[in-house]
Image: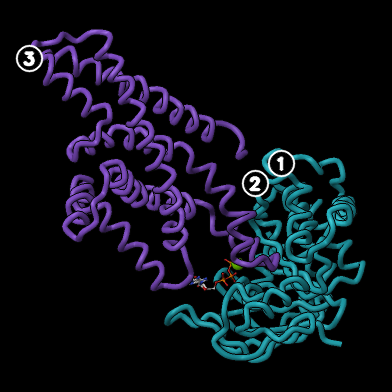
Chain colours: A purple, B cyan
């Protein structure tokens, strides 16, 4: 086998694999967003058992490494007889990971809405659902934008963990090319640059949103 | 015809008993002022009246509704009982018009055109017609408080509760809010107001209640109560207030 050098073809492969990093990120944010939203609501529910269950979920997810979630869903489930394709296992574990963190971020945002807003809307005879829908969530969502976008940056970077189960995203593609070229410095510099190109604008967006929220009006 | 009946109400926060058997009756169209030292339980009493705080024992009937456990019945009661707080509590993400129309639209299913009509009417009542499309943070404190009053009025309440609604305002702004409340009183609204504005209580309230240590310490027609306090506590309170 002849050694290749890191050239356009290889860079093209990295770009192609970057797509899978992004796909995984989107899956994690949508899946984790839906699940995390439900958990955040449960975390602020009136029934104490519901709150405790949600808090436990968050504690557990945040208390174990993403890698373990990944191994559990990939090897664990295959031991139990389910043969999961890497994309499903990767998507599922990133979803679970994101849900635990988004739930906690959003719980904070819901609770950041002053309790007088609850009292005023309650006094106007709104149901709990109406309070969330028309008064609390619109304000909480505004507050949540900067930390949520900030967390998306973490997700982009953490998808690299799924390379361990053989899912070919950007980091895994870098390893494969390095195995063929033995030019680790060039290869991983290119990989790092690609992560940066995705993450940097997101970080900036998060900062911009935060400034916009702090300066000026409450709209 | 009594619009508000409070009977032997007790309320504790943990070990702290804040209301120690409070009873009062407010007739339709009457205006009651609640005065008393900080911590005497005025806000708590008011908040019990629309179920924001649960009472430990006693009975409350207001605008024809008995206060109870049932959530639906409680919401029914709240459509007839408006409350305005010291801190305005307007919804900051909605315009003035939207703030006022929201509850009639979603709670009482009022049609949009009708809700808008009502909003314009109550805004005119508080003298802020031109602020329909403004956001709360574009208004002064006094204007925000008048919008909060308008927002309550849009529900067509039978009883209005006011908890120190001018305490956060400068004197000039206080005046514009008090004028709105005085107008409401003249129009026959049944009102209970916690206030530190003794002059206003004397002028507008038919009855004044002096609360002390979780009890109604003294009660009477405002004129008599202020002119001739019976208890040393009230005498002390009235004296210390004349600054
Ligand atoms: N949610 C609560 N939990 C515990 N204690 C409370 C709560 N709300 C009020 N209290 C206590 O109950 C007592 C009465 O409070 P309340 O707010 O009714 O007094 P107030 O007469 O309205 O006083 P102020 O003039 O300062 O508004 C105070 O000692 C207060 O600390
Ligand atoms: Mg008070």
The reply to whether discs 2 and 3 touch (Cβ–Cβ < 8 Å) is no
Residue under disc 3 on the same chain as residue under disc 1: no
Q: Nearer the viewer, mark 2 or mark 3?
A: 3
Which chain letter goes with mark 3?
A
Residue A5 visible in this rendered orientation of the protein: yes
Q: Which mark is residue A1?
A: 3
The residue positioned farthest toward the left in the image shown: A1
Q: Residues within 10 Å of mark 1 (few under 14, many from 20)?
A: many
Left or right, residue B62 beside residue B187 = left
Which percent across, then down, holds residue B99?
A: 73, 52
**Ligand 1 appears in which quadrant?**
bottom right
Q: Residue at x 60, y 63 (%)?
A: A129
Quadrant into which the N terminus of chain B falls: bottom right
Establish if B94 lies above or below B154. Answer: above
Q: Residue at x 17, y 51 (%)?
A: A75
CA separation in Å, label 2 and label 3? 67 Å
Q: Residue at x 66, y 74 (%)?
A: B46
Q: Secondary structure at mark 1?
A: loop
Q: Which mark is residue B135?
A: 1
Which percent across, then down, holds residue B229?
A: 72, 80
Occupied quadrant, residue B240: bottom right
Establish if B170 lies above or below B198. Answer: above
Left or right, residue B192 beside residue B111 = left
Front residue of this view, candidates B74 and B114: B114
Which chain letter goes with mark 1?
B
- Between disc 2 and disc 1, whose residue precedes? 2
The reply to whether discs 2 and 1 touch (Cβ–Cβ < 8 Å) is yes
Left or right, residue B137 beside residue B159 = left
Which percent across, then down, holds residue A152?
A: 38, 36
Occupied quadrant, residue A67: top left
| Residue with the mark numbered 2 | B92
């Amino acid at each position: 086998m002849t050694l290749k050098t890191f050239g356009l073809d290889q860079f093209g492969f990295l770009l192609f694999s970057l797509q899978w990093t992004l796909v995984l990120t989107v899956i994690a944010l949508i899946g984790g967003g839906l699940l995390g939203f439900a958990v955040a609501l449960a975390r602020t529910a009136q029934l104490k058992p519901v709150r405790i269950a949600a808090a436990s979920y968050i504690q557990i997810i945040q208390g174990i490494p993403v890698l373990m979630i990944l191994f559990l869903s990939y090897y664990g489930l295959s031991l139990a007889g389910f043969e999961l394709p890497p994309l499903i296992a990767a998507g599922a574990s990133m979803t679970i990971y994101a849900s635990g963190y988004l739930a906690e971020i959003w719980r904070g945002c819901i609770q950041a809405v002053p309790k007088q807003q609850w009292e005023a809307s309650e006094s106007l005879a709104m149901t709990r659902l109406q309070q969330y829908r028309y008064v609390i969530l619109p304000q909480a969502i505004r507050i949540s934008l900067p930390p949520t976008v900030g967390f998306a940056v973490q997700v982009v970077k953490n998808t690299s963990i799924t390379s361990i189960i053989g899912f070919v995203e950007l980091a895994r593609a870098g390893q494969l090319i390095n195995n063929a070229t033995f030019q680790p410095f060039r290869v991983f510099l290119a990989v790092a640059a690609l992560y940066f190109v995705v993450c940097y604008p997101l970080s900036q967006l998060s900062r911009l949103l935060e400034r916009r929220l702090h300066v000026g009006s409450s709209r | 015809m009594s619009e508000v009946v409070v009977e032997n109400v007790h309320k504790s926060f943990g070990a702290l008993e804040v209301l120690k058997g409070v009873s009062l009756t407010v007739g339709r169209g009457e205006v009651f002022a609640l005065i008393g030292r900080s911590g005497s339980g005025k806000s708590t009493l008011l908040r019990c009246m629309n179920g924001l705080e649960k009472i430990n024992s006693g009975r409350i009937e207001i605008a024809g509704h008995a206060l109870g456990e049932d959530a639906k019945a409680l919401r029914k009661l709240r459509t007839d009982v408006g409350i305005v707080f010291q801190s305005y509590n307007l919804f900051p993400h909605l315009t003035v018009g939207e703030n006022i129309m929201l509850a009639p639209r979603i709670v009482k299913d009022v049609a949009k055109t009708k809700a808008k009509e009502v909003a314009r009417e109550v805004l005119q009542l508080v003298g802020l017609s031109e602020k329909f499309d403004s956001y709360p943070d574009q208004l002064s404190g006094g204007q925000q408080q008048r919008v909060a009053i308008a927002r309550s009025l849009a529900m067509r309440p039978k009883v209005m509760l006011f908890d120190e609604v001018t305490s956060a305002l400068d004197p000039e702004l206080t005046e514009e809010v008090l004028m709105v409340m005085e107008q409401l009183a003249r129009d026959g609204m049944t009102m209970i107001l916690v206030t530190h504005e003794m002059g206003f209580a004397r002028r507008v309230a038919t009855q004044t209640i002096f609360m002390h240590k979780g009890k109604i310490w003294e009660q009477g027609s405002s004129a008599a109560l202020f002119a001739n306090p019976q208890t040393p506590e009230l005498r002390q309170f009235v004296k210390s207030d004349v600054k």
